[in-house]
Amino acid sequence: MTLPNDDLSASARKILAARFDGLPPVIPTTKGWSDAVGQIENTIAYVPPSGNTAHAYVHRRLGPISVNPNVADSRESLIGTYEHASDNPSAPNASDEDIEALLCDLISQANKERDYADNPTLFDKTDRRMAAVGEAVTALYGRRGCGKTFLLNYILARYAELLDEKKVIWIRINLVEDFGDNNLVHWIHAQCAKVIMRYYDPNSKVERLTPRPIPVQVEPIVVSYINAESDIMSQKDLRDDFRVMKERFYRKGQEPPLDPSWIPKSLVEHLFNMVQHLGYSFIVALDGLDLLEATPHHNAKFESLVEQLGTIAVNPTSMGMALVAVMRTRSLEALATVTPKAYAPLKASARRVGVPSFDSILRKRVNFLSNHVPEIVESFDDPAYAASTDWGHALDQFVDRLNERSGAAKLLDMFGQNRRAQGQVVQLAYHEHLERHLQRPYLLIESMVKAGRSYPPRSYHYSIGEDGGLKRSATSSLLFDNHFFPSVFTFPYVDYREETENPVRPHEDGYLLGLRILQLLYAHSRRMNRSRRIEPLKLGEMTQLCEELFSYPEELVVNLIEEYQECEFLELLPLGSGPPTALARLQLVQMPKTPYLLRHFLPDIAYLSLAAMRVPISTLAASRQPPYFEACTLDLVGGGDLLAAGVFDKLLARWVAVKIINACELIRLVCPINEKQRQSFPANSRALRSRLKETALVAATDLGGDIPAMFDFTDWASRKILSQVGRIEATFVDIERVKEHLARHARHWLP
């Protein structure tokens, strides 16, 4: 390959060539650590959407659509693209009439539970007992990816006005998140309080598409409750907590994660009861049980939540709400083991969600987008291009090419009835379609990594739990499942600011853990493709490979694999019945995103630059001017004012320079780790048993012609980066400014 040799490429080449020298301390013992975005997060009050091109919008709408009943486009897209089940005419989602019947049943039950909680004398014991069997909790179940969550999202989007008319408040809880000790009743009341304060209280800054049906003045209710408290110190604590609740719930922007430390149990229960007195009923949807089932980290939490759910189902005392529990078929059967008393009533109320035809889903998406995109061209950053494109023809052309490509068809077939996974295959195919037939596909890469934000989100934070192990909690970035391609160079670590007394240092070689997991999984999948006798890799075997080859501790490996399952790089499937209790009872299945990332994303400077923004580095390295990695965005917070002021050219020049610098520095950072692991691999692999040794050898020597072997990644990526730098020089309009900017940065890095 002939590499470009002019000034800009030479600067990048020097950085890559100096990768073993002059590195600032990455993980110090006392100075603290964070990532580049973390250095500026406290200064960001609201982060606007990013990747706002027409193609980025189409790409997002081809996949799972998030629900927010107060965002018009989100509601319209959900309603316009929903496809009913085709495999079961008696399914609750077989038609709009069936969905309305399900919702009417839930509303009826919510009203009944409200009336009973408000006045238990309205019902005799026999009636209440019947209500507890098959009515108090409704189970929606089906296999993973069949559309259970999408059904809930559709109900909320389509019938928001009906719910308001009936004075029913719809609550959704993602059980994958954590809420202290996960007391389910407290969690439900806390989520109800958040929704009431954000969307029903006139003092909230959060806007609604429709007027609040009956405004709920929360403050008088809470103040009256606090004043009735006899203990002065308790009054003070309650006032302090309520002040925090107002600050976080009334604020416009992303919804804050819940924490029981500032949400008093008695206070939110009282608020819930008083809102019921105003005539409101509640439907609470509990989602995410299926994700908890297939992870050892969540096994105890899964059993605890299922047991609590079972207690609610058979409790003769009403909670005052209708509960909808969303679960896999396996999760429902697990109830028979975990909580036998609850199994019968939940089984009696269970409704199996039907699976729509994927061809019908795709055709409905394409038809909707063909008509909808021309209607909203002014909302895009490229309105002229969006207005001049024949979207019906362009999308039909994409579908024709998708159907012609046997590889995509095989991937779609591979996932059976998992419509979520198949949707992601289509999104990947759309990206590849743009890359081959249109310009600037890197914009779509950036959109996927940033997941609709100005900076790549961090989906999870870690702290030290009471047992001394890592405790994972989802951030607000995961509200609506908005994650697509996270950085594979970050890994579980405890934030320094969270553990100040005895800081737990991030693993010094952790930057390559995610990549090693995916490379080993891909290598084993290649072995399985060559021979049917090769069984899937078990989770315990993957932890053994990572520990014996590279000294990564089991806890770190398991946590990162669980993250990767939730963003669908892979899937964990239990062996046998019931929830998993050991690593040996879970097998790893590769998802289509893994080979796509290894093949297309890893050498792309757009991906590497954004991935670098979430890599943990020392405070010293982050605070240098310029810092080791830099968090930068091209999004225009000021919109047209910035364009008029001529600021965009400067932002663009800085953005391009930061992309090149971040990509180069990320490769430079991992090179010493990669070389150390290469040197130790022969001796470490000899200790493995034959099955695992063969997988390790395939990873180290033969991942296929278009994916480099495990330790060849850095050289391969370096060549790809320099080639892209050459293309940037050939196309960028103001290259002199970029050269000057890059040269100024490079002087700070080179020894």
Image (cartoon, rainbow, N blue to C red):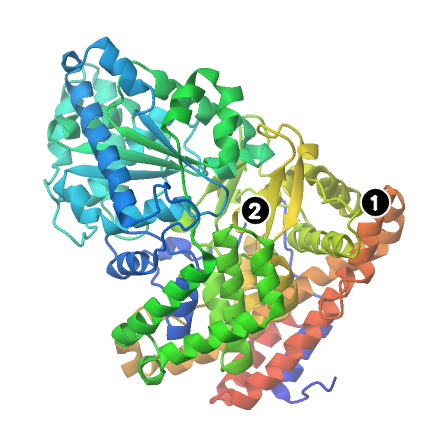
Quarter containing the C terminus:
bottom right
Residue furthest out toward the front: 89
Kindly identify which numbered label has been placed on residue 565.
2
Kindly identify which numbered label has been placed on residue 255: none
Residue 526 vs 586, above or below: the answer is below
| Side of 746 relative to 523 (left or right) | left
What amino acid does circle 2 point to? Gln
> In whole angstroms, how far apart are the C-alphas of marks 2 and 1?
24 Å
Q: Where 228 falls versus 167 (above or below)?
A: above
Q: Residue at x 74, y 40 (%)?
A: 541
Residue 691, labelled with which disc? 1
Marks 2 and 1, the one that precedes in the sequence: 2
Residue at 63% over, 27% down? 581
Q: Position of residue 531 (x, y in %)?
A: 80, 53
Quadrant of the rendered image containing residue 406: bottom right
Badge 1 amino acid: Arg
Mark 1 element type: helix
Q: Give me the residue at 81% from left, 57% from top.
A: 698
Of residue 324 and residue 9, the one placed in the foreground of this image is 324
Confirm or deny contact between disc 2 and disc 1 (CB under 8 A): no
Is the residue marked by circle 2 packed among few (<14), some (14-19), or many (20+) residues within 10 Å?
many
Q: Is residue 36 visible?
A: no
Residue 749 x %, y % = 63, 70
State the residue lying farthest toward the top.
Answer: 125
Look at 85% across and 56% down and name the residue there.
679
The answer to whether 138 is drawn above or below residue 723 in the figure is: above
Query: Would residue 145 appear left or right of 717 to someone viewing this image?
Result: left
Q: Left or right of 81: which side holds 29?
A: right
- Determine whether 678 is above or below 475 in the image: below
Query: Could you say whether the residue bearing mark 2 is in a helix, strand or loop?
Result: helix
- Residue 548 location in percent, x, y? 79, 43
